[in-house]
Image (cartoon, helix red, strand yellow):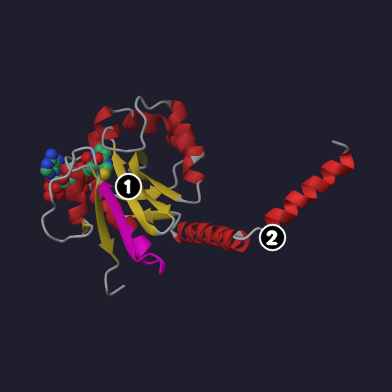
Amino acid sequence: MKKAKIDSAVLEAEDASAYRPGGTERSIAELEAATHKLTLRRIRDMLPGKIETRRLVLRAPIRGDVPELVRNANNKNVSSKLARMPHPYTGADAVAFIELFSQRADERPYAITLDGKFIGIVGLSFYEGRAPELGYWLGEPFWGRGIATEAGRALIDAAHKIPLVETIAARALPDNLASIKVLEKLGFHRAGSKAKPKKSAANIPALFELQRPRWM
Ligand SMILES: CC(C)(COP(=O)(O)OP(=O)(O)OC[C@H]1O[C@@H](n2cnc3c(N)ncnc32)[C@H](O)[C@@H]1OP(=O)(O)O)[C@@H](O)C(=O)NCCC(=O)NCCS
């Protein structure tokens, strides 16, 4: 095909796509998706940079956390309970978590630090059209001291100060009794029912929800 012919073919194709039925709907959908992304980023950016509790400081994960991050995350007892944590957990996984994952508009992880030392992660993940999801894990030496509950409560309190956050969700495997206990202590209930849950498959996480308290 000669150049002029190619140009006119391209123009025709562009015209056709511009005036194709559904083009406007597609533009509206794209605009809605972009607006939603901005809203997620706005909520994410409204969360405080640093949260202090009685024993803990929650702050953004940093490069200096890599050694402790690997030490605590490279443990099957931790990763087997989490949908997104690889095992074995390497230095490259830790760097990717800090440099890429933590920077995403739809993720807001906080390093949980005790006496200045990295011991785990608590965070919120944001999704289009559904409630932000709380997630957490701690290095095994730090389990059983109420730390996940303390960190989770602090992040929930901060999130509930943001007017756009009405409901916070969380998921836990049915056999993850420690995590379910944490969620119960934080006031979550199983989504869809306040009654005793039906037995669910061991590898399918159960969904929990927490509404913003009426007084906030
Ligand atoms: C789940 C996890 C974050 C809990 O952290 P933690 O700081 O030990 O939690 P807390 O001490 O705040 O609370 C744990 C509660 O569970 C209870 N618990 C612990 N193991 C339990 C078990 N096997 N059965 C029943 N209850 C259990 C504890 O007694 C405590 O309840 P209490 O305060 O009434 O005594 C930690 O075990 C962990 O990192 N696990 C691996 C990753 C993970 O599961 N993340 C959550 C994914 S949904």
Q: Answer left or right for 189 relative to 100.
A: left
Q: Nearer the viewer, residue 113 or 6?
A: 6
Whether residue 54 is visible to the viewer of this picture, yes or no, is no
Whether residue 202 is visible to the viewer of this picture, yes or no, is yes
Mark 2 Cα within 10 Å, few/some/many (few <14, many 20+)? few
Instruction: Single out the residue that lies furthest toward the left.
Output: 196
Mark 1 lies on residue: 135
Q: Nearer the viewer, residue 163 or 2?
A: 2
Q: Quadrant of ligand 1?
A: top left
> Which quarter of the image is occupied by the N terminus?
top right
Mark 2 lies on residue: 19
Q: Nearer the viewer, residue 182 or 143?
A: 182
* Rendered view: 142 above or below 134: above
In the image, residue 165 lies at what x, y percent?
38, 64
Secondary structure under the numbered disc 1 in the rendered image: strand
What is the spatial separation of the Cα atoms under label 2 and label 1, in whole angstroms? 45 Å
Segment tinted magenta in the rendering: 156-171
> Is tag 2's residue or tag 1's residue first in the polypeptide sequence?
2
* Rendered view: 124 above or below 78: below
Q: Could you tell me which residue is drawn at 51 percent across and 45 percent down?
A: 103
Indicate whether residue 166 is drawn in magenta: yes
Cβ of mark 2 under 8 Å from ligand 1: the answer is no
Given the image, on which type of amino acid does mark 2 rest? Answer: Tyr
Given the image, on which type of amino acid does mark 1 rest? Answer: Gly
> Which quarter of the image is occupied by the C terminus?
bottom left
Mark 2–mark 1 CB contact (< 8 Å):
no
Q: Could you tell me which residue is drawn at 26 percent across and 58 percent down?
A: 209
